[in-house]
Image (cartoon, rainbow, N blue to C red):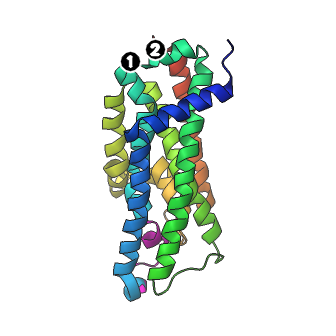
Amino acid sequence: MTVTAATVLRSEWTKLTTLRVTWAVPLAGTALGVAVGAVTCALIGDVQPLLIEDPSVALYYGLTVFQTVFVCFGVLLIGQEFHSGTVRTALTAVPDRALLYGGKLAVGAGYALGLGLVLAVGSFAAGRALLDHPPGWTDPGVPRSLVAAALHPPLMTVLCLGVTAMLGNLTVAMGLLVPTVLFGTSLLGALPGGRAVHPYLPDQAGLYAMRLAVDADVPYPHWAGTAVLALWAGLAAHGGLRRFRRYDA
């Protein structure tokens, strides 16, 4: 029996929706991201111009904080199978490793994109209702910012799935990626030697793409931030595929 791409996609979607922790973690993060963004905007209120020059910092604050749930999501998508050993069963059912890996990427990125759209539009709408000086939907830079915010979760998911495939270990991937995104990249930017590379780190580049104000320390335009993140994600996905093809199952 020939295994088709449609069959693999259905199978991977079934795995995703059957394992509660896999689909619930990013869904909860999306809801919390919108809620935290709304609370942040409500607290800033009419003093917003005194506290921040760029309202997008408040609008997407929840996404900035909860982007780590998409890191966990990307790790869990393939890391669970390494951890439990069920990757051997999956490879028996789908001997074409590139097809199996591509199915995981497509399903994970598609689910994260749907949640990213909800997170981006929900955060922006909540902020517009709660800030005293909110940007409009069609103001300069806003459409680009919304697109960047929606693409950030799926690109981070692909990046982390690829890194996990390269490592072949759930625990190591989670222990490396979550602290790095949560603390590491921000701390690196505070170091004199790290400031030059800071804008080129994947999560930081993606976050800058959402901003409305220009940062003189970032040597590229806003839209290029998403391109930098996409490049990192593509490289990780490619590296993960190469490692997955050689995985000893």
Image quadrant where one finds the C terminus = top left
Residue 139 in view (yes/no): yes
In screen coordinates, is 35 left or right of 15?
left
The spot of residue 126 in percent (x, y) is 47, 74
The residue labelled by disc 2 is 88
Using the numbered discs, state the Cα–Cα distance from disc 1 to disc 2 in whole angstroms. Answer: 6 Å
In screen coordinates, is 63 left or right of 211?
left
**Front in this rendered view, residue 40 or 11:** 11
What residue lies at 66% left-to-right and 18% top-to-bottom? Answer: 3
Mark 2, Cα crowd under 10 Å, few <14 / some 14-19 / many 20+, is some
What residue lies at 37% left-to-right and 79% top-to-bottom? Answer: 42
The spot of residue 16 in percent (x, y) is 48, 36
The spot of residue 56 in percent (x, y) is 49, 71
**Front in this rendered view, residue 131 or 208:** 131
What residue lies at 36% left-to-right and 73% top-to-bottom? Answer: 39
Is disc 1 in contact with disc 2, using a CB cutoff of under 8 Å?
yes
Is residue 38 covered in magenta?
A: no
In screen coordinates, is 114 left or right of 20?
right
Find numbered disc 1 in the image and state the secondary structure of the residue it sits on: loop
Residue range highlighted in magenta: 49-60
Residue 54 in view (yes/no): no
The residue labelled by disc 1 is 85
Is residue 54 covered in magenta?
A: yes
Residue 238 vertical placement versus 218 (above, below): above
The spot of residue 106 in percent (x, y) is 60, 37
Find numbered disc 2 in the image and state the secondary structure of the residue it sits on: helix
* Tag of residue 207: none
Hey, what amino acid is under mark 1? Answer: Gly
Hey, what amino acid is under mark 2? Answer: Arg
Res. 36 image quadrant: bottom left
